[in-house]
Image (cartoon, rainbow, N blue to C red):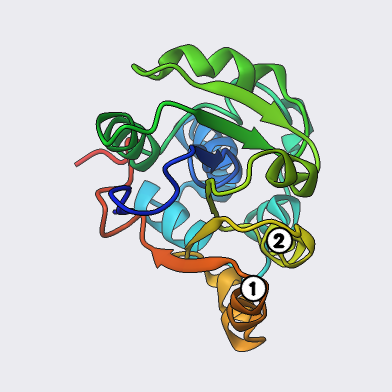
Amino acid sequence: MVDFTSVGKSGVIFQYEDIISLSGFNVLNRFREQGIDQLKDKSEVDLVMSYFNRDQYSVADWVQQESSLPVQEYMNSPIMWKPSLLYAYKIVDVAYKSGVKTIMIHSNQYVKSIEDNMKTFTQPVTYIHGDIVPVLKQHPNITYITSLPDNIRKCIDSGVPFVLTIVDDFGYVHKIIQDKVDEELRKKNILVFFTSIISGGFIDTLKE
């Protein structure tokens, strides 16, 4: 869990993609629940672990790897973007109780379904979207929580001090570590920490 007692007190930004919603998993799990033959031998746990372990961020590539189903009908749908992780809800409450009152949810592109999901949080949150660099420039000394490789690399050029917390449960984050991107970020006056969704009690979809 992120420690808000000494850093990032000006606010927190959560990435929606893969921190709040496992979008690709949501889509294929819906097909699995419908009894589609291609997924009949896969359990919910099989799908979610495959999603976490994927080497590339691309949701479309992962879906194609797992099946040849016509997922286009679900792209950017409420099903695809439904919240599936408890982590963000827990940490929003922790941040708010620690005195962090500016809480934002970010997605790379505007999605109405994501905006609609803001009402599921018990604390007040603001939905923002678009290129992360201008957002960071407007909010120095904020805590930004993400796992997305492209966004992490973009942080090098933000030009402002802030706290970057990288969720490293996903296989695609390994390249960031191998390329020592975290070292480059620290050279830019950016505090870098790592955290885990899994160890933080992460998921709200799996059934016993």
Q: CA distance from mark 2 to mark 1?
A: 7 Å
Whether residues under marks 2 and 1 lie with C-beta atoms below 8 angstroms apart, the answer is yes
Query: Which residue occupies the foreground of this view, 90 or 13?
Result: 13
**What is the quadrant of the N terminus in the image?**
bottom left
Q: Which residue is mark 1?
A: 185
Mark 2: few/some/many CA within 10 Å (<14, 14-19, 20+): many
Is 111 placed above or below 131 here?
above
Please tell me which residue is depicted at 79% across the width and 36% down the height of the picture.
Answer: 130
Query: Which residue occupies the foreground of this view, 142 or 71?
Result: 142
Please tell me which residue is depicted at 59% across the width and 29% down the height of the picture.
Answer: 81
Q: Does dot 1 land on a helix, a strand or a loop?
A: helix
Please tell me which residue is depicted at 42% across the width and 42% down the height of the picture.
Answer: 9
Q: Position of residue 118 (x, y in %)?
A: 51, 18
Question: On the picture, is 12 further left or further right than 203?
Answer: right
Quadrant of the image occupied by residue 182: bottom right
Label annotation for residue 8: none
Residue type, mark 1 in image: Leu
Query: Which residue occupies the foreground of this view, 125 or 37?
Result: 125
Residue type, mark 2 in image: Cys
Q: Does dot 2 land on a helix, a strand or a loop?
A: helix
Q: Position of residue 112 (x, y in %)?
A: 70, 17
Residue at the left extreme, as displayed = 208
Q: Position of residue 31 (x, y in %)?
A: 56, 35
First-in-chain label (2 vs 1): 2
Question: On the picture, is 149 further left or further right than 39?
Answer: right
Question: On the picture, is 113 further left or further right than 194?
Answer: right
Is 68 placed above or below 57 here?
above
Please tell me which residue is depicted at 61% across the width and 44% down the height of the picture.
Answer: 24
**What is the quadrant of the C terminus in the image?**
top left
Label annotation for residue 155: 2
How many marks the image carries: the answer is 2
